[in-house]
Image (spheres, rainbow, N blue to C red):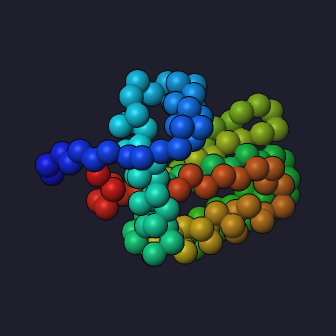
Amino acid sequence: MSKIIRFGISLDGDLSRRFNARLKKKGYSNRSEAIRDLIRQDLVDQEWHEGHEVAGAVTLIYDHHKRELLNKITDTQHDFQKAILSAQHIHLDHHNCLEIIAVKGNPIEVSKLADMLKAVKGVRHTTLSMSTTGKEVA
Ligand code: NI
């Protein structure tokens, strides 16, 4: 870990009050940790926009009874095998499945994988959690 740097921030009173209220709601015990998280989030956004290696998770909710759906989901995952670290399948109920796919690689590839899975007929909901490998964001 590098040296800790301290700096002051000038804020409009109203903005400061709103920020403090938000921190309280989110459970932060101090402003520094909240500001560090905002900075990290901005750096993660930059990693995704500038094409650095990223990590994250794609989650899918789908009805496994739909014809061809499982084949399409499996084929797509094989096509993007380089970007997929692992996948976990959970049977939610009689109809619905939850699949969590851990991903790492080029953000364009990872986003394309999420978009292709989202477009499969019978997939009810998809999210892409955009995170970091941790190499760039401390
Ligand atoms: Ni299932």
Q: Count numbered badges in the picture.
A: 0
Q: Quadrant of residue 32?
A: top left
Q: Is residue 105 above or below residue 32?
A: below
Q: Quadrant of residue 6?
A: top left
Q: Is residue 46 above or below residue 34?
A: below
Q: In the image, residue 23 lies at what x, y percent?
A: 51, 30
Q: In the image, residue 18 lies at what x, y percent?
A: 59, 34
The residue at 45%/75% (across/down) is 51
The residue at 38%/46% (across/down) is 9
Which of these two is toward me, 21 or 88? 21
The residue at 40%/34% (across/down) is 31
Q: Is residue 131 left or right of residue 60?
A: left
Q: Is residue 119 left or right of residue 98?
A: right
Residue 9 visible from this viewpoint: yes
Q: In the image, residue 72 lies at what x, y percent?
A: 72, 65
Q: Is residue 86 above or below residue 52?
A: above
Residue 19 visible from this viewpoint: no
Which of these two is toward me, 117 or 21? 21
The residue at 53%/24% (across/down) is 24
Q: In the image, residue 8 lies at what x, y percent?
A: 32, 45
Which of these two is toward me, 104 or 52? 52
